[in-house]
């Protein structure tokens, strides 16, 4: 196993109390002195840091926008992405059974370890130090956010548009499901009867197909004078 000095170098912080970092990398299957309490602390700090970063980024964000984008940035998938970039699985301590079952590569365990590391930095050096570590690791993600990721998703935008016109919500239906259970493709329709609009979307999930159908409906409506539909 690699030395903790290398992990400190990768996260950009050197601990005075090495026991904190040792605990942050320890899964509950390895020892009673594991990382779950630090994970709890790190989760709270992470939400605050990312929330503040988004708040400062654009004053036009609504509370709903901030909450939605933050949730996408602090979720297990994103933390797993960061953890794999850091290579945190090279440093994890866990029981033999968990190790044999591939625990070191499990996204949930990698994500929990990253939160625990953030919590350990906070416990030792306070908020500003933890914020510096988090923003350094998140920097490529934050600077790479696209307008689509920062805005509301197509289904939400379409629904809010119709609500603003006092029209009923769009209706979504599954048109077709292709492929085997483990590799399916969904085709869904989006129908707005009051506007005589119907589109279809295709994706590997029902939700994705609905989003694609909603996006196509928005493109159609963008070319129309919506005032004639207002009730």
Image: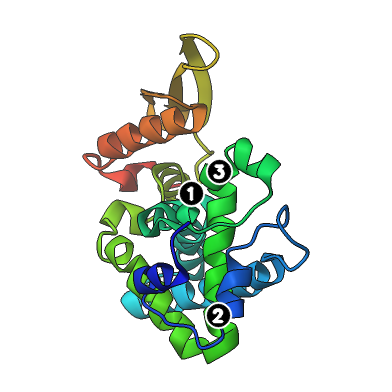
* Frontmost residue, 111 versus 5: 5
Q: Is residue 162 visible?
A: yes
How far apart in space, not on screen, are marks 1 and 2 (Cα)?
28 Å
Q: Secondary structure at mark 1?
A: helix
Residue 90 in the image, given as x and y percentages of width and height: 46, 54
Q: Residues within 10 Å of mark 1 (few under 14, many from 20)?
A: some
Residue placed under numbered mark 1 in the picture = 77
The answer to whether 211 is drawn above or below residue 21 in the figure is above
Instruction: Kindly tell me whether residue 126 is visible in this rendering.
Output: no
Cα distance between the residues tagged 3 and 2:
25 Å
In the drawing, does residue 201 fall left or right of residue 144? right
Name of the residue lying farthest toward the right: 32
| Residue 200 in picture, x, y percent from top left | 37, 22
The structure residue drawn at horizontal position 38% and vertical position 41%, both measured from the top left corner, is 229
Residue that mark 3 sits on: 106
Q: Nearer the viewer, mark 3 or mark 2?
A: 2
Looking at the image, tell me whether mark 1 or mark 2 is earlier in sequence order. 2
Q: Which residue is mark 2?
A: 18
Q: Nearer the viewer, residue 6 or 166?
A: 6
Q: Nearer the observer, disc 1 or disc 3?
A: 3
């Amino acid at each position: 196993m690699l030395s903790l000095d290398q992990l400190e170098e990768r996260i950009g912080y050197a601990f005075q109390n090495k026991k904190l970092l040792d605990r942050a990398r320890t899964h509950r299957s390895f020892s009673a002195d594991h990382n779950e309490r630090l994970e709890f602390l790190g989760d709270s700090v992470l939400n605050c840091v990312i929330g503040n970063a988004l708040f400062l980024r654009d004053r036009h964000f609504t509370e709903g926008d901030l909450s939605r984008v933050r949730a996408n940035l602090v979720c297990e998938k994103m933390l797993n992405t960061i953890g794999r970039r850091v290579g945190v699985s090279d440093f994890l301590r866990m029981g033999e059974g968990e190790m044999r079952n591939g625990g070191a590569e499990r996204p949930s365990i990698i994500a929990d370890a990253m939160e625990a590391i953030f919590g350990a930095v906070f416990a030792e050096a306070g908020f500003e130090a933890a914020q510096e570590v988090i923003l350094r690791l998140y920097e490529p993600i934050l600077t790479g956010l696209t307008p689509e990721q920062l805005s509301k998703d197509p289904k939400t935008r379409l629904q809010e548009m119709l609500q603003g016109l006092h029209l009923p919500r769009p209706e979504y239906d599954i048109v077709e499901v292709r492929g085997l259970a483990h590799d399916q493709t969904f085709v869904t329709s989006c129908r707005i009867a009051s506007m005589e609009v119907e589109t279809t979307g295709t994706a590997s999930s029902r939700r994705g197909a609905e989003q694609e159908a909603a996006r196509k409906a928005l493109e159609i409506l963008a070319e129309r004078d919506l005032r004639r539909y207002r009730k």
